[in-house]
Image (tube, coloured by chain):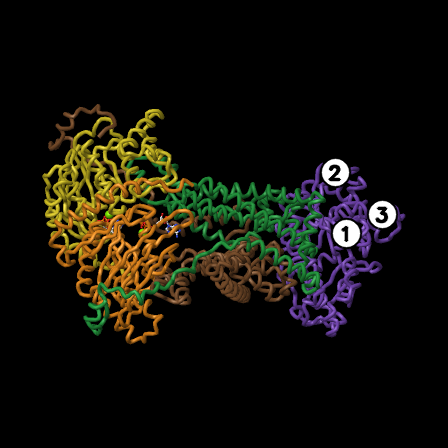
Chain colours: A purple, B yellow, C orange, D brown, E green
Amino acid sequence: DKINVGILSLTSHSPSIIAEAKGYFTEQDLEVEFISFQAAQPMAVAIASGDVDFGMTAISGGLISLADKGVIKIIGGALQETPEIEGQKIIVSKAAHDAGVTTPAALKGRSFGITTTGSSFHYMAHKIADKEGFDRAEIHLKPLQKVPAVIAALKSGQIDAWSIVPNIAGPLTKGPEVVEIGKIADYIDNYQVTTVFTSTANAEGKQELVKRFLAGLSRGIADYNAALVDKSMSEEDIAAIVAMIHKYIYSDQPIDKADPRIRAGAMRINENAVLSLASVEDQLEWFKSEGLVPEGITMDKLVDTSFVETR
Amino acid sequence: MQLVLQNISHRYGGTTVLEDISFTVDDGEIVCIVGPSGCGKSTLLRIAGGLEQPGAGAALISGAPPEGSLNPLTYIFQDFALLPWRTVEDNVSLVLEDHGIERRERRSIIADVLARTNLADFAKALPRQLSGGMRQRVAIARALAVKPAIMLMDEPLSALDSQTRELLMDDLIALWSRERFSACYVTHNLNEAVRLGRRIVVLSRRPGRIREVVEIDMPLTERAARLGELETLQRRVWEIMREEAREADREISDVA
Amino acid sequence: MQLVLQNISHRYGGTTVLEDISFTVDDGEIVCIVGPSGCGKSTLLRIAGGLEQPGAGAALISGAPPEGSLNPLTYIFQDFALLPWRTVEDNVSLVLEDHGIERRERRSIIADVLARTNLADFAKALPRQLSGGMRQRVAIARALAVKPAIMLMDEPLSALDSQTRELLMDDLIALWSRERFSACYVTHNLNEAVRLGRRIVVLSRRPGRIREVVEIDMPLTERAARLGELETLQRRVWEIMREEAREADREISDVA
Amino acid sequence: MSHETTVPETARADAVGTRDEATLRPVPFRGGGFVHRPLGPVAPIVFLAILALWEIGSRSGFISQIALPAPSEAFGALVDLATSGMLWKHVGASLYRLFVGWTLGSLLGIAVGLAVGLFSLARAGLLPLVSALFPVPKIALLPLFIIWFGIGEGSKVATILFGTFFPTVIATYAGVDNVDRNLIRMGQSFGLSWLSIVRKIIVPGAMPAILSGFRISASIAIVLLVAAEMIGAEFGIGAYILMAGALFALDQLIAGVALLSVLGLCISWLIGKAEKRLLSWRA
Amino acid sequence: MSHETTVPETARADAVGTRDEATLRPVPFRGGGFVHRPLGPVAPIVFLAILALWEIGSRSGFISQIALPAPSEAFGALVDLATSGMLWKHVGASLYRLFVGWTLGSLLGIAVGLAVGLFSLARAGLLPLVSALFPVPKIALLPLFIIWFGIGEGSKVATILFGTFFPTVIATYAGVDNVDRNLIRMGQSFGLSWLSIVRKIIVPGAMPAILSGFRISASIAIVLLVAAEMIGAEFGIGAYILMAGALFALDQLIAGVALLSVLGLCISWLIGKAEKRLLSWRA
Ligand SMILES: Nc1ncnc2c1ncn2[C@@H]1O[C@H](COP(=O)(O)OP(=O)(O)OP(=O)(O)O)[C@@H](O)[C@H]1O
Ligand SMILES: Nc1ncnc2c1ncn2[C@@H]1O[C@H](COP(=O)(O)OP(=O)(O)OP(=O)(O)O)[C@@H](O)[C@H]1O
Ligand SMILES: [Mg+2]
Ligand SMILES: [Mg+2]
């Protein structure tokens, strides 16, 4: 069967690329075409409209909205914060650091970069505020649409703080403009950062296809974790996998430049796409509490638990 | 063919423009209509040609149009009304195209009328390349192409400078001498009226009523030589109109 | 004050427009310039008024302008050249504002010239509310406001219909009888030329050369009564020009 | 009157002077058409009909929920916005940006446009630049604007300023070019100073063109509001629309777009008023 | 000639007929100005001067690297793009979208514009809708466009189609309205059929307005290219610019913007050619 898989230019989307390159999807009798997106929200919309079959992104307000309209479903988990692997960082600009923002507690009254309202960054900012015990409104959110825009704003000191995955945070904190002040893991337990999702039509009408996709993906996830997170593969195999990924990610840079970027700070992706329901529910509750999604949406409407193991 | 205007009145919105106008244009006769600005001359001519429906009264025709006439009542406009994107010959062709005349015959009609108006050399020229006088000649050629029974001319010379007007008036008189067309000729210019008109219908200022109808018995071709007599006639018409014209001139339009 | 044109020639790009024109406008005298379309009449007048620099020759003035003249050489344009966004009085005011005349005096000058041109009732009207004849009267009032020594008039009546033209010609003659202004009066219209001119300079078609200068000794005020004599004169001028006019009319412009 | 002489002269002569009452018939009417009759309240009826059809389509499920929300839902979103008091915050923020950006852009544009219209050197030097930069999409420049003007009000105002500057330049210089040369010549012939001619003849003469340029620049400014508020805007109609898009809250999206539409109508109404006042001298 | 009669009659009489050669003096020149002299190659000189200054500023560090790359770098990016063969892929993809979207939008726009221009009912019903939808920013509708037209070429073409449709409608109906009523009346007076009048008088008469509408719609189409290629475009100049912007690769960004500018110039040159051919009848 032919399926379309949406990807973003982020290393966390590598498992499906690996699965395709290594023929795991072909084994499942799936012919995969990758469709690149600049942002998560259009991918969710494209899945709703049936242009794309499967995608993997953070849970956003747009995704929940579409789930509420009964057109898409979360079917598995992907990136998740785990205690033993380095997780997302809270970073601040040099200027803010000099002004005394050395711990997340000092973010009260500071500006915090996000891409769009209802994005995972928005969630993280509020979770920090909640845990540090100040009002959510006291952290000033600056929607900047795109990750690179946030980076630029942070580097030039136009915003004070941001939170981001380690492979982006790493290179930033190496430079003089950005300082790390904390970890997201301290504020959110077992944060299910990204999930696998598909259209309701697929989840309900083509369950067998979904299963085959997840099976192929799971093998890709296993390879990804082995190669980049646990580094339990031989260097040759790792290099081969990096080369596969490079076809889609950082493809505008030569392989020798892209290679370290791909390897740096890879985060664990749940084996067999296991899903943390607790984290998803926490996120859903937050969206509801902020009035970003319709009141009536339930976990049942958002998640189809029949495909993967949950915890 | 005759054109008969019977008790025509007309109003635009609240203002009466024409009141109870009746006269007849006989075959082979040029009737001139003069009157001050805005007295409704153009409106009257539009009614006569069926371009506008009169508020009261009727424009009637009697008698059959001459054989082969494609458009018995044909206009000649003050601003020439040539299509600027068509050459001279195509402008003439325009009015023949809807009549199912075959190409060959159309071309011969066009050549004929252009020759009769001395325009043969200009067949391929665009209107913008021609002087005002030549443009009006093209409009006349176009009118001739449809073999009209009666020509309705709305100040055909008033967009031209006075020398060109003089030249065209000579042409018109020559044309009339050859073809004896009938015409209803609207003008401001009393000199034109006395040079061309068999009768001159003098209108009052708005609302236009017939003030007087002046008959001129002198044959058209003799008039150039008897300008003195015409001068007195022209003076007489001007005396009738002078005050009306002055009033019309001093009218102030909507202070909106 | 006299205006002296000496051997004026002018060319635009490759085409010679004027060739070796010389004549003089004496004090209190109206000189008419007639000639076929495009022969360079307007160009000549622009040169006379210092709006254009002649290719060769010179426009000169001799004698002092009358006391208090703000603008010795003053134009009256064919298209009236009124500012459409100013009322009649403000249009007159425009030409006084740059001369440092104080407000009170300005108002009295405006009232004076409007009264002399019978425009007092129209002081607050906008140009668009006026008929063409009234607009040209405003332009004349504006010209009077700067106390000109010589008026340069470029076909001042040719944008008007012939009845209004007749009325304005009467006004001009009355004005001249009172004020004896000198003027250089360009026109196409031979009737105007013989009614107004002390001398008529007849130009050939382009390049404009002086064909003939016709002197008319009859006093202006008598001319209305002696139209017969003028008629012959007009005929004579027309005979001189007819062929030139016909040629000019049949000229085809750039086939670009 | 004929092309050949086939019509016998006698037939003509017969007709002269005789009026055959029996054959009197009216001149056929052939005018009419090609004019616009006012048709009464068609526009509101069409508008309401579309809304009604849309509502019915949505309710019956014919128009899918994810394709388009029902107008009533969009209206509901608008009411929510108003009751929560956020409406004024959003509208206020946008109006401020529009006002500042548009005013500065227009002033600069008029100044440059006058220079281009009056001085050959300015025309030769600036006009090609203006023509080259006018069609550059402003969203493409957002990253640069962030660097140049920051993520605060600066970049938002600048986006709108840039968007309004170029059309105003073009409208102004075209207006100056279109001022009747005869009026300028008249001014010169009365010895008016250069400045008087510019102030009293050229500027008022170019005013209709400048005002109609305002219409265009105002709609461009409104269109650019969304782009401008992409960067770091908490409030503003554009930010509201972007947020609605990100959350896929189509009711709010439509509500926001309707707000922009209404804003555009209001501004063009205001400009219409200004035209009526300033250009009352026109027919 | 004076307002009061203070000037003595004798002073006048003296002057008549005497020409005082000594006082002969030229008429003061007061024309001139307010015309545009062609100044030779000022535009290219200004353009080159700006590029040179910019380059020097960048090299000397006066213009910071992050604020603006040197023009040579942007040119380098363009050369890279060309040598890698990607240039044609990007340009080709964009041209295809522009062509299809603009053609469909223009055809539909002309059809609707003619209907609005010719029929009172269409005018009353459609015109308010067109006016209301024209100023809606297309980026605001992107999420809807994905649902309606998918993420393939559909939504990109639709964005451009929508962008070009409305201005074409407005240009066309305004053109029809501006056709000389006297020409229409002439057509009627010669008994031309309704269709003949529309085909031979109204359409050619509206052509100048339609063509100048094309100029506007073409630049709008180019501006919208960036917005259109926001959704799922791998290739295209807009996609290239967006990618460059996302990576803050300012040299590529400037290169892409320059490409758009050149594209705009080419299209307006083509339209100029078309105008010359189709409107050769104008002065
Ligand atoms: N379609 C129209 N709607 C309303 N009023 C009109 C219309 N056509 C003409 N009028 C008015 O009717 C009056 C007579 O107009 P008409 O054009 O017939 O006068 P005219 O005698 O031809 O004038 P002119 O000598 O200036 O050509 C004028 O006051 C004019 O403003
Ligand atoms: N500024 C100009 N540049 C180039 N050619 C010009 C210019 N002004 C006038 N001409 C040309 O010079 C010739 C004379 O023009 P001018 O306007 O002086 O003639 P005119 O006698 O006033 O004509 P008309 O009787 O039509 O008013 C014409 O052929 C005209 O095309
Ligand atoms: Mg009329
Ligand atoms: Mg002239």
Q: What's the residue type where badge 2 is placed?
A: Leu
Which quadrant is home to the C terminus of chain B? bottom left
Three-letter amino acid code at disc 3? Ala
Query: Which residue matches tag 1?
Result: A11
Name the residue beneath numbered marker 2. A30
Residue pictured at 23% horizontal, 71% vertical: E3
Task: State the CA–CA distance, disc 1 to disc 2.
Answer: 22 Å
The part of the image, by quadrant, that contains residue E157 is top right
Q: What residue is shown at x 27% (from left), y 41% (from top)? A: C246
Give the percent coordinates (x, y) of residue B3.
17, 36
**Identity of the amino acid at label 1?**
Thr
Disc 3 within 8 angstroms of ligand 2 (CB): no
Q: Which mark is residue A239?
A: 3
Whether labels 1 and 2 belong to a single chain: the reply is: yes
| Marks 3 and 2, the one that precedes in the sequence | 2
Which quarter shows the N terminus of chain B?
Answer: top left
Chain of the residue that carries numbered disc 3 in the rendered image:
A
Residue D25 to residue B200: above or below: above
Distance (Cα) linking label 3 and label 1: 14 Å
Q: Quadrant of residue B220?
A: top left
Q: What percent of the width, then of the height, locates residue B25?
A: 15, 37
